[in-house]
Image: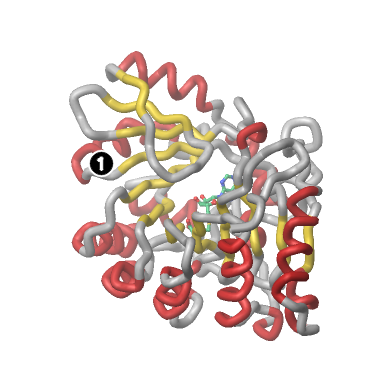
Amino acid sequence: MQNPLTDSFNRRIDYLRVSVTDRCELRCTYCIPKGFTDFEEPEHWLTFDEIERVIRAFTELGVRRVRLTGGEPLSRGKLPVLAGRLARLPGLEDLSLSTNATRLGKLAQSLKRAGVRRINVSLDTLIPERFAEITGGGRLEQVLDGLMAAKAAGFSPIKINMVAMKGVNDDEISNVVDFCIANDFTLRLIETMPMGATGREASDHYLDLQDVKRDLESKYEMIPAVMSGGGPARYLQVAGTSLKIGFITPISQHFCATCNRVRLTVDGTLYTCLGQEENLALRPLLRAGIADDELKEQIRGAISRKPERHEFTSQPDKIIRFMSVTGG
Ligand code: SAM
């Protein structure tokens, strides 16, 4: 490997999140706006060949972990084929997937066979009517089927991502804790981020996870824990159980100083910070026939310009793209 990818704040970048589509059939209140139709044109989507080429360049630059995300990644046709191609790239040690799980019932086995190692599933509530409200008409049953299929396919750990919202689902945190204990899932609680108009509206329901942590500590005996995955979550384990709870606190306790990741959108834009606009448009370079060495130099250059931190708190109106565009 050449010199590892390092930014100007001496952060080593070894994790790439790849959005394979900006589309999703769900309309979570904090994510894609209701009625939104202005999705990326299919001719602008990176092809599987282009995605593989960019990820190969990243692995040659020392990236070891890739997560497929979106939009809803399983809505991109033949995703297990892409996963299989990526899993075979030399140097890639950890291929993971974030999904809403609505198609996981059908695809869990083939994703496992393709080499996806870990799965995160978004699930904000266990109440069917509430699930339909939060997701704009989604069916909880499909997600639960998908989760069970992932378990049966042998994925472990399976992490549940719950965006914790005051007055929306904060009364359910204990139920979700029990659900995760019963099913041997890991739980990650996430603070809402002001991304796009929807994210900002959801910030009206912002819940400080430091308070949730204190509340959980008063109900359960919690002990410090570590969890594989390279992410920003800080974990505690519920004593006497295998449940680990991760707290993802971009607002109450930001973790930019240890950020190790960048994001590639479906149209081939490389964003070096979730909460800033700095980016590098790779698609025009790829389609103009850029050579491999030059591609890697461009990536290095973009990483060297990675911003120090997001400004979600000081400039909450700054980011107009919502999460599904960048790939959450
Ligand atoms: N469709 C996949 C899924 O459901 O996990 C992957 C994409 S989704 C955009 C990734 C994650 O971003 C989900 O866990 C979602 O809850 C989270 N998310 C979206 N908008 C958010 C916001 N404004 N604040 C915090 N989390 C957000």
- Horizontally, residue 309 falls left or right of residue 55, namely right
In the picture as drawn, the residue positioned furthest to the top comes out as 218
Q: Answer above or below: position of 291 versus 140.
A: below
Q: Quickly name the residue at label 1.
A: 179
Q: Residue at x 71, y 61 (%)?
A: 270
Instruction: Identify which residue is drawn at 80% across, 52% down.
Output: 277
**Kind of residue at badge 1:** Phe
Can the viewer see residue 159 in this picture?
yes
- Judge by depth and name the residue closer to the eye, 178 or 272: 272
Vertical side of 79 occupied by 242: above or below: above
**12 with respect to 116 (left or right):** right
Residue 105 visible, this orientation: no
Residue 149 percent across, percent down from the top left = 24, 64
The residue sitting at the front extreme is 2
Report the residue at 71% width, 65% height from top. Answer: 296
For residue 98, side relative to residue 275 (left or right): left
Which quadrant of the view contains residue 293?
bottom right
Disc 1 secondary structure class = helix
Label 1 neighbour load within 10 Å: few <14, some 14-19, many 20+: some
Observer-nearest residue: 328 or 228?
228
